[in-house]
Image (cartoon, grey):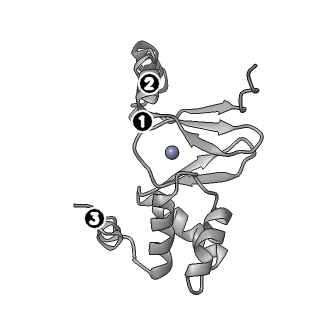
Amino acid sequence: MMATTRELFARHNLRCTAQRRALYENLAESRSHPTAEELFLTVKPSTTRLSLATVYNTLEALCKAGLARKLPTSNGSCRYDADTSEHLHVCFRESNEIQDVPSELGSKLIEHLPRSVIAEIELKLGVQVDGLNIQLLARPSPPRG
Ligand SMILES: [Zn+2]
């Protein structure tokens, strides 16, 4: 059974307000990796007393609690993703839109990363690599034919 947003917030020690709930649920349903402004414009009509500042604060709190990810784009603005599973993104250079790479292709790429180089990085920097965040930069392919 899927946990309700209220239960999910409680498990992550997040205060549950109507605004936060609406923002999280909208982000979780969205496949478009919205910016804070886009999320604000989508959620505002159906939510009382929602300010852009609340959207930013909520997104920060969600990221800190591990319920969302912040994704940088090539123009320096940020997009958000409620899917925190390890998956890769394609970021379009001109539109700064972000798209998920199908997980089977993402895993294929990750599997082919040389473990020996990661081990070397760990040794050289004295760190333990425990995650991976790959973003491919792309432009739409030109029409064929
Ligand atoms: Zn994603």
Q: Which residue is located at x 31 percent, y 69 percent?
A: 4
- Closest to the observer: 32 or 65? 32
Q: Which mark is residue 3?
A: 3
Q: Which mark is residue 131?
A: 1
| Residue 99 location, quadrant | top right
Q: Residues within 10 Å of mark 3 (few under 14, many from 20)?
A: few
> Which of disc 3 and disc 1 is earlier in sequence?
3
Q: Which mark is residue 34?
A: none
User: Is residue 64 rendered to the left or right of residue 37?
Assistant: left
Q: Residues within 10 Å of mark 2 (few under 14, many from 20)?
A: some
Query: Given contact means CB atoms under 8 Å apart, are the residues at marks 1 and 3 in contact?
Result: no
Q: CA distance from mark 1 to mark 3?
A: 25 Å
Q: Which mark is residue 110?
A: 2
Asked whether residue 72 appears in the rendered view, the answer is yes
Task: Give amino acid for label 3.
Answer: Ala
The N terminus: image quadrant: bottom left
Q: CA distance from mark 3 to mark 2?
A: 30 Å
Q: Which residue is located at x 42 percent, y 48 percent?
A: 84
User: Is residue 42 rendered to the left or right of residue 64?
Assistant: right
